[in-house]
Amino acid sequence: MDCAVCNSKICRKADACGIEKFDIDEIKIEYAKEENQKIIKAASALVDDGRAGSLSRLNEIIEFVKTMSYSKVGLAYCYGMEKDARAVRDIFRNEGIKLSTVSCTVGGIPQNAVNLESCNYNVSCNPIGQAKQLELENTEFVITMGICLGHDILLQRNLKVDFTTFVVKDRVFSHKPLAAVSNN
């Protein structure tokens, strides 16, 4: 498939296209499950009725957390964004949301223990440790903030709860990765 260059856009008229490898009816059954309907309804509340574009990503996450009635939320962040992580923590607490913040350096593991080919003994990022700590904290939902590429994959693989991304790290474009598209 190459939807980005499709001219017919029949999928936007509720007409099937290119769906040979999976069964639409099976997908509809998945959407009908209670746990998926709860998320669909919470997400829909953020975009329906002309609300799309009226909330910042942070406000969307706060509203989603409240709608889903999560009682304990985790924030997995890069230590380089600690000042911002503190600000996010304060905002969530002011909204009455308990937020556990876990830095990527949790556990203080040396880099040569994480990357077996490294001779570096400095503290390493520990995304698996972040996931384990957030599990110990009994978080029901996790927000990621500025986790390095690759580390984000390990974190997400090891999370046992739903998660979303608040900030994607892009050191060149001040954490606004879409700026790279307009610069090409």
Image: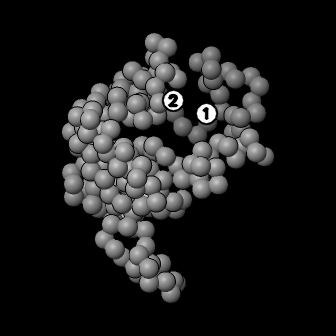
* Residue 134, above or below 122: above
* Residue under the point 33% across and 38% down: 91
* Residue under the point 52% across and 49% down: 168
Q: Name the residue under label 1.
A: 19
Residue occupying the far top of the picture:
49
Residue occupying the far bottom of the picture:
119
* Residue under the point 51% across and 33% down: 23
* Residue 146, above or below 38: below
- How far apart are the alpha carbons under marks 1 and 2? 8 Å
Residue type at the position of mark 2 = Ile
Query: What is the quadrant of residue 99 in the picture?
Result: top left
**Label 1 crowding class (10 Å Cα cut-off): few <14, some 14-19, many 20+?**
few
Query: What is the quadrant of residue 88 in the picture?
Result: top left
Nearer to the camera, 41 or 89? 89
Going from N to C along the chain, the mark reached first, 1 or 2, is 1
Nearer to the camera, 39 or 33? 39
Residue 144 location (% of width, % of height): 42, 49
| Residue 150 as seen in the image, left or right of residue 138 | right
Work out whether residue 4 can be spotted: yes
| Colouring scheme, one of rainbow, by chain, secondary structure, one colour | one colour
Q: Are marks 1 and 2 in contact (CB under 8 Å)?
A: yes
* Residue under the point 48% across and 78% down: 115
Q: Name the residue under label 2.
A: 24
Residue 173 location (% of width, % of height): 64, 49
Query: What is the quadrant of residue 156 in the picture?
Result: bottom left
Residue 124 location (% of width, % of height): 43, 73
Q: Which type of secondary structure does the marked residue at label 2 adopt? A: helix
**Label 2 crowding class (10 Å Cα cut-off): few <14, some 14-19, many 20+?**
few
Q: Which type of secondary structure does the marked residue at label 1 adopt? A: loop
| Residue 17 as seen in the image, left or right of residue 141 | right
Nearer to the camera, 69 or 87? 87
| Residue 57 as seen in the image, left or right of residue 85 | right
